[in-house]
Amino acid sequence: MVITLLKESIHFAWQSLVGNKLRTFLSLIGITIGIFLIITVFTVVDSLERNIRDSVQSLGENVVFVMKWPWTFGPDYPWWKYMNRPQPQYFEMTDIKRKTASAEAVAFRIGVRKTIKQKNNVVENAIVAGCSYEYGTIKNFDLEEGRYFTEVEADGGYKVAILGKSIAEGLFPNNEPPIGKIIKIAGYNTKVIGVFKREGESMLGNTMDNQVLIPFNYIRLLMDVKSENYEPFIAVKAKPGVTNAQLKDELTGVMRGIRRLKPAVEDDFALNETNLLSKNFDSLFDLVGIAGAIIGGFSILVGGFGIANIMFVSVRERTNIIGIQKSLGAKNYFILAQFLFESVFLSLIGGIIGLLMIFLLSLFASSAMDMQISLTQSNVVLGLTISIIIGIISGFIPAYGASQMDPVEAIRSN
Amino acid sequence: MAIVKRPRIISIICIALVLGCLVSFFYLFAPSIKKLGGLIPAVLGLIITLQFVSVIGLWHMKRWGVQLFLISYFIRFITFYLLGILSTYQSVAAVFMTFYIIVFLVHYRKMDINL
């Protein structure tokens, strides 16, 4: 019984859709645009959120960064005070390491832009980052080949380097294995000991693809590490079971002690956390999501009106058929299901076309932007559900009207 | 099939419920709802659909409208309770819904039994 009803409904719906191609197209387009808009916004927001989450994770989740500038500012932040703050120094890192009980690992990192050469291949303006040994414990590095520095190499300032993927491709364009090769960083011969996996574009701008990592005691040769012109930081990773708040409290005391700040004097350093960044992005994405929901919601609503309109026309066109069906014994629910199915079918096709468009767009965007934009399963389910809901809501009134028709009057009408 | 005259109070409630469905429809896409999980917006969408269809039944003074409204009301309450999103707004809505149900039950006997 149900299968017969389903088969007949599909048949009727298909006949109606194919018989009026232009009308079908025009009524589908509203739902297609609505689903396209709303799911595109959700897909982009989800992809950006995922990108940020990955970037934050690669920075280390339970890590506090001691820096000159805070990552987040209020509306009236006193930038003139921050300007006069000193940059973190290497000796402060060693002091923190000695004095902070809740720290598992402490590392110093400073970066500078230099030209790197390998025979005739040159990469200009590459970021050369010098770091202390424990940076490898704090940041989640993913090496494609080779290894990280040993403690001896880091402390001894050995001339060794780990290349980002883009840098490695620039210096070794013919798929030559870079491990063990000698490159020149600002004129110094340096041995390549590792290559990072490709990370792709990062929302936080912290991709390792265009960086070269060398030991801190080596970068001292390439730059004045005490200069105020660079942006060094000290990264402190909390011990397991220690919260970031506890670590920050202890670090504040330790840093104030190191810098000999009197009780009444304000901190002259910032303690930054990665979750502060992701929280800021969360509110931005919420805003984008709400804007997308309103625009997409209205488009879908308009699309729903279009389908309701088509369904009223469809009922009117088939009034005498309804009359004949009823006079032959068709029940009200049978007529109701027929038309309801037609509107759901129509709406679902519109939704599927919209989702297909997003899928193609995400493939194109992913290849063009070096960032993974993917249509998730939950967004596909949401898109299809919205299509079905709109189909039911917009088709129920015309379908119910058809089911309530008097068979005699319906047959008479022309 | 006798046509039952619809009391004015039910007309007003139906209009209020349709407006409520419209607001809830936009609420479906809210980031806070999306964060609850992949299938939650779909479940809430189903509840809105049930409520809308029940309003059409109520408009036509059909008993299935009241029955469907009660079902949608309980599904909605249980879902919101399980998700832990029973806010003050939901409590106020629950008071109104209870009032609506009382009105519907008062007029239930007058309603048509057929589809």
Image (cartoon, grey):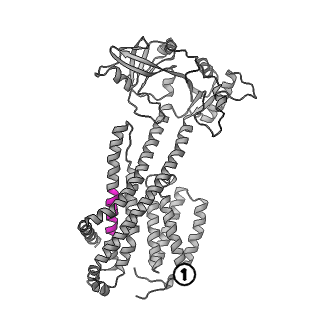
Q: In front here: B55 or A101? A: B55
Amino acid, disc 1: Arg
Q: Chain of mark 1?
A: B
Secondary element at image label 1: helix
Question: Dividing the picture into quarters, in which one does residue A266 lie?
Answer: top right
**Above/below status of B77 relative to A159:** below
Relative to A196, A63 lies left or right: right
**Above/below status of A194 relative to B6:** above
Q: Position of residue B59 (x, y in %)?
A: 47, 78
Q: Is residue A158 visible?
A: yes
User: Start and end of the magenta stretch?
Assistant: A340-352
Question: Which residue, given by chain and number where applicable, does mark 1 sit on?
Answer: B8
Q: Position of residue B93 (x, y in %)?
A: 58, 66
Q: In front here: A192 or A204? A: A204
Q: In front here: A412 or A212? A: A412
Q: Position of residue A347 (x, y in %)?
A: 34, 63
